[in-house]
Image: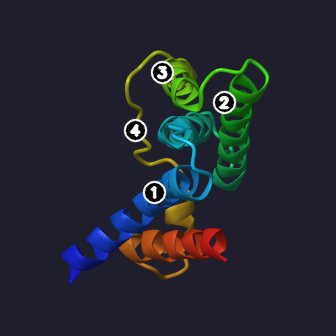
Amino acid sequence: MNFVLSSLSEGLLWSIMAIGVYLTFRILDIADMTAEGAFPLGAAVVVSQIQAGANPWLAILLALVAGMVAGLVSGMLHTNMKIPALLTGIVTLTGLYSINIKIMGSVPNLSLGDSATVFKQLASLGLTNEGAVFSLSLVCLLLVWS
């Protein structure tokens, strides 16, 4: 049962990025790959802020703003500079990889270890770690879907 809950939790986390890709490819009919770069950008912002001692909820809010800025840059490249959508996505995606490394202090990965996270705060309410991830992911998915 632990394997199933863990798999569902991870799948729900990745489904948020899948919805972003679906929206651009199917609904907007644009081949935009900004979502693939903005998803790790959000993770880089959150982990760097949490390691700096920021509140995890504030770190998530900052990650949301960073993703909005990434989308804004991508949109400006496409509309104002008349760069084709596919090339804009590739340029933004490539640039965000370098920006992610810079945000994380020039190291390829950072560990949260014993840092306070949103999932640990939810686990302190009596949920297991997997249950906290599953619950928060489901809430995010329902917010996006509605």
Callout 2 amino acid: Ser
Residue denoted by label 1 = 18
Measure the C-alpha gap from mark 2 to mark 1.
Answer: 18 Å
Callout 3 amino acid: Thr
Q: Quadrant of the C terminus?
A: bottom right
Which type of secondary structure does the marked residue at label 4 adopt?
loop
Q: Nearer the viewer, residue 86 or 48?
A: 86
Crowd class of label 3 (few under 14; some 14 to 19; many from 20; radius 10 Å): some
Q: Are marks 1 and 4 in contact (CB under 8 Å)?
A: no
Q: Nearer the viewer, mark 4 or mark 3?
A: 3
Instruction: Of the two numbered discs 1 and 3 on the same chain, state the one appearing first in sequence.
Output: 1
Q: Are marks 2 and 3 in contact (CB under 8 Å)?
A: no
Residue denoted by label 2 = 74
Measure the C-alpha gap from mark 1 to mark 3.
Answer: 19 Å
Measure the C-alpha gap from mark 4 to mark 2.
Answer: 29 Å
Instruction: Of the two numbered discs 1 and 4 on the same chain, state the one appearing first in sequence.
Output: 1
Residue denoted by label 4 = 111
Instruction: Of the two numbered discs 2 and 3 on the same chain, state the one appearing first in sequence.
Output: 2
